[in-house]
Image: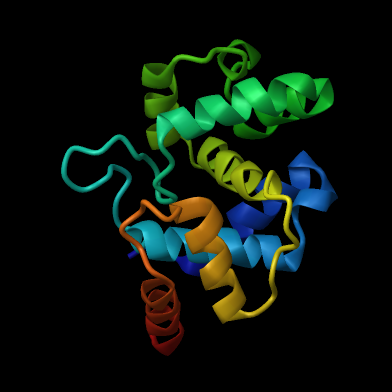
């Protein structure tokens, strides 16, 4: 079983190294809980034959969207992403979904960065309650087309808290 304390530390450190504005306690908690809900920190590939990768079940298309529509316009952030993830800068400038499928599966920090930036790009304030984070996750991460529910989010987090 993976240590959630170590994962939380990795999430915090990764986000903080990007810039302290990315590492608020609410953001770290939301990314931690997203991994719990998406994979229970057990799976790095989407069950079945779906494209999502990493504990945070990020689709390569989402990573490419972060790259093409956000990161590429922020030179300092682009370089920080490469440095923090220890993934060559040329890959952070590459919009190949097969490449990002591999990186997301093999590199925890790169996956954390994409999860965090997916939430960062939401134009709504991040909530600080479990119920608020569940709704935020459903609306902006899982989306209305996703199979997840706010109830599943809350139950997944409460199960972890009971352990």
Residue 58, by quadrant, is top left
Asked whether residue 6 is in view, the answer is no
| Residue plotted at (41% across, 89% down) | 162
| Residue plotted at (69% across, 71% down) | 127
As displayed, is residue 97 above or below residue 13?
above
Residue 133 lies, in percent from the top left, at 58, 70
| Image position of 138 (left or right of 68) | left
Residue 52, by quadrant, is top left
The residue closer to the viewer here, 124 or 110, is 124
The residue closer to the viewer here, 142 or 3, is 142
| Image position of 95 (left or right of 43) | right
| Residue plotted at (34% across, 57% down) | 39
In the rendered image, which quarter contains the C terminus? Answer: bottom left
| Residue plotted at (68% across, 30% down) | 81
Residue 74 lies, in percent from the top left, at 80, 25
The furthest residue to the bottom: 162
Asked whether residue 106 is in view, the answer is yes
The residue closer to the viewer here, 117 or 143, is 143
| Image position of 118 (left or right of 99) | right
Residue 70 lies, in percent from the top left, at 70, 29
| Image position of 18 (left or right of 56) | right
In the rendered image, which quarter contains the N terminus? Answer: bottom left
């Amino acid at each position: 079983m993976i240590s959630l304390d170590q994962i939380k530390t990795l999430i915090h450190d990764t986000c903080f190294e990007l810039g302290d504005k990315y590492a608020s306690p609410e953001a770290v908690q939301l990314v931690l809980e997203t991994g719990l809900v998406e994979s229970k920190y057990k799976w790095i590939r989407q069950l079945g034959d779906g494209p999502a990768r990493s504990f945070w079940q990020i689709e390569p298309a989402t990573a490419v969207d972060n790259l093409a529509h956000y990161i590429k316009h922020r030179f300092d952030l682009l370089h920080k992403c490469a440095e923090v993830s220890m993934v060559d800068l040329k890959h952070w400038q590459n919009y190949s979904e097969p490449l990002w499928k591999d990186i997301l599966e093999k590199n925890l920090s790169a996956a954390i960065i994409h999860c965090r930036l997916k939430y960062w790009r939401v134009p709504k304030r991040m909530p600080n309650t479990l119920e608020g984070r569940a709704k935020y996750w459903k609306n902006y991460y899982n989306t209305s087309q996703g199979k997840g529910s706010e109830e599943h989010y809350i139950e997944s987090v409460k199960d972890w808290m009971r352990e």
